[in-house]
Amino acid sequence: MDLLEPVSVYYLGSGRLGVPIVEALCRGPDLRLLGVATQPDRPAGRQRRLEPTDVARRCAELGVRAERVPSVNQESFLRRLSDLAPEIVVVASFGQIFRPPLLELPVWGCLNVHASLLPRHRGASPVQAAILAGDARTGVSFMRMDPGLDTGPVYRRVPTPIAPDEDAGRLEVRLGELAAAVLPQVLVDVVRGGLTPQPQAPEGVTYAPKLSKDDGRIDWSGNAERIARQVRAMLPWPRAFTWLPTASGPRRLQITAACVHPGESAAAPAGTLRVSPEGHLIASCGQGELALLRLVPEGRREMPAQDFIRGYGISRSTQFTAAAHES
């Protein structure tokens, strides 16, 4: 039997999901990676130093050049891509809108690796949305891109369960690894085998808009189970947060690990703190109670709740506030 020619691929990726994928594209024996593009370096941290994307950082370790592209729709980029003549363009966690000239440039179009089981959780934050919704499972979808928001037909879906304690950062990495294990064969099936994508069902469509910092703000009048999911969904960014009253005014407090506290809830206003007889830090919610396991006080490093209890005076009247200006 004649050996098939390697599939020529160009890759566009930026975030954590895309790191295992670029590794798979580099080493796939049936693939020929023609190039990689990623978002430009962005200011980050208190010093606002320019930092490369996760994909750019991994490419540097692999010895692969990652072109920084402010807009994939610019004529200059489209000309370079046309000269390379990839059979298919792979996209994962890239963060730009694709216009028809780019979508139609490769013979086999642009294949997007989306971190949900489409049509559920279309949009920019599907990993966080799945955790917030309390979904028992999620997965990756391999979709042929069209001008809509994650509306294109799907070549293949690969499901996976969500662990009860899994946060968004860990789940995103695991979904990237899951996608990387399947993607090379999907590309061969599409380009060499003529795999046909199937339209998404009109039922079950949900949207996962881009996160903002304020999505981490905790509303203590809510359900303890929902707040526990929020803590997991907001890691590593923007992190769930609240405001702790102190003698010098309210201070921002990030909560990085928490779980629902079992048993009968104490009768206290939402957001009230107490230390249980076992030494656990407990916050009252609108429904149920939340055990706070790890916290980051403003200007301090992350610490376990026991260290926080020793360092900060917790009285029966200590109650979180909803905003910095509240007393």
Image: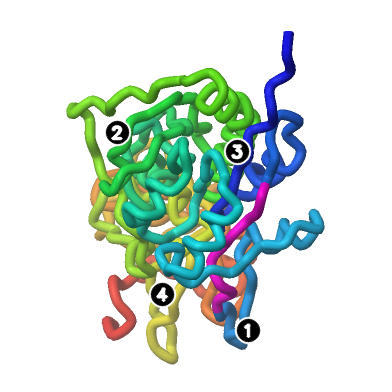
Label 4: few (<14), some (14–19) or many (≥20) C-alpha neighbours in 10 Å:
many
Which of the two labelled residues, at mark 3 and mark 4, occupies the earlier sequence position? Answer: 3
- The three-letter amino acid code for the residue at tag 4 is Leu
Q: Give the mark nearer the N terminus: 4 vs 1.
A: 1
Asked whether the beta carbons under mark 2 and mark 4 sit within 8 Å of each other, the answer is no
Between disc 4 and disc 1, the foreground one is 1
Disc 1 to disc 2, C-alpha distance: 38 Å
Q: Are marks 3 and 4 in contact (CB under 8 Å)?
A: no
Whether pointer 4 and pointer 1 mark residues with C-beta atoms closer than 8 Å, the reply is no
Query: Is 113 drawn above or below residue 256 in the view shown?
Result: above
Task: Let me know if residue 323 is in the magenta part.
Answer: no
Q: Residue at x 36, y 45 (%)?
A: 129
Q: What's the residue type where badge 3 is placed?
A: Arg
Question: Quick one: label 1 or label 3, which is nearer the N terminus?
Answer: 1
Question: Which SS class for mark 3?
Answer: helix
Q: Is residue 243 above or below residue 78?
A: below
Q: Which residue is mark 4?
A: 244
Distance of label 3 from label 2 (alpha carbons): 20 Å
The residue that label 2 is drawn on is 119
Q: Which residue is mark 3?
A: 174
Spatial CA span between label 2 and label 4: 40 Å
Amino acid at the residue labelled 1:
Arg
Q: Amino acid at mark 2?
A: Pro
Tell me the quarter of the image containing the N terminus: top right
Does residue 159 lie above or below 90 as drawn?
A: above
Q: What residue sits right under mark 1 in the picture? A: 49
Q: Position of residue 264 (x, y in %)?
A: 34, 38
Per the model, the C-alpha gap separating discs 3 and 4 is: 34 Å
Q: Residue at x 60, y 42 (%)?
A: 9
Q: Looking at the image, which is closer to me, 317 or 35?
A: 35
Q: Tag 2, which secondary structure?
A: loop
